[in-house]
Image (spheres, helix red, strand yellow):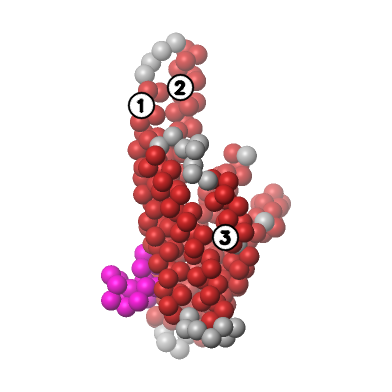
Amino acid sequence: MQSSVESFINVLESYRGRDKVIRTLVYGSQLVGGVLAGKSSRSSLGKSLLLFSAQLSHCRTTLRLFDDLSMLAYSTSYGLGASEEDALVRWMSILTNIADQMYYPCEHMAWAADAELINTRSDRWWVLSTGLWGLSLILNILRSIRSIQILKRKVQPCDRSGPADSREEAFSQKAALRRQIRGEVLRVLSGVADLSNAVHWMPPGFLWAGRFPPWLVGLMGTASSLIALLQMSSSDQEA
């Protein structure tokens, strides 16, 4: 019990860990609040949870005002992806970094317009930032699918029999590759869940934009957030 509490505290002490916890609370509250509000329009708890979700979401938007430099540092360190073995993975990663880098200033402009710090309409900036987020998600999904294909090809030689020492090494390598495949599958599922919400937040008339009830938005976001927490926990354990 104590170790679990300490692990949770360690997560909260890091910016990325805290953001993932807040994100889970945002969508979890929207899920439960949406269900309660859907059952009864007079549900005070449902309305309170939806308001709580909106406030936490605004908190995350404000905190992202400081993410530009960290994103730029990551994009610079990745560069043209010279370390990548596959050209498709490399170029999809580069395009993803560009979309992510452009996302932040667009969201900042929307935030500033809503706060009446600048005299412009926020809706066009929100649409642009959501579109960039959706583009990044699509690229990430395609990159993960491509990575799965590459990893599966690497697993096949490990199945061949050989000397005992070689079999043991191959078994260890195969287990590591399968863990990577599971990680990429989870990224695909997480990306699809987020992409469904990104489309929902686009202008009406675009696919299923605006058609999700609050509880469904919360369900998609909660699923994605829990996957992110699971992956972060797995990475910490491996480290």
Q: Which residue is mark 2?
A: 170
The residue sitting at 36% across, 64% down in the picture is: 196
Marker disc for residue 156: 1
Between the C-alphas of marks 3 and 2, the distance is 35 Å
Q: CA distance from mark 1 to mark 2?
A: 10 Å
Mark 1 or mark 2: name the one nearer the start of the chain. Answer: 1
Local secondary structure at mark 2: helix
Give percent across and percent down for residue 141. Answer: 38, 51
* Magenta-colored stretch includes residue 225: no
- Dot 1 falls on a residue whose secondary structure is helix
Measured as percent of width and height from the top left, residue 17 is found at 62, 57
Q: Which residue is mark 3?
A: 20
Q: Which residues are magenta?
A: 196-213
Q: Is residue 119 above or below residue 158?
A: below
Name the residue nearer the viewer: 144 or 4: 144
Drawn side of residue 67 relative to residue 203, left or right: right
Is 155 placed above or below 179 here?
Answer: above
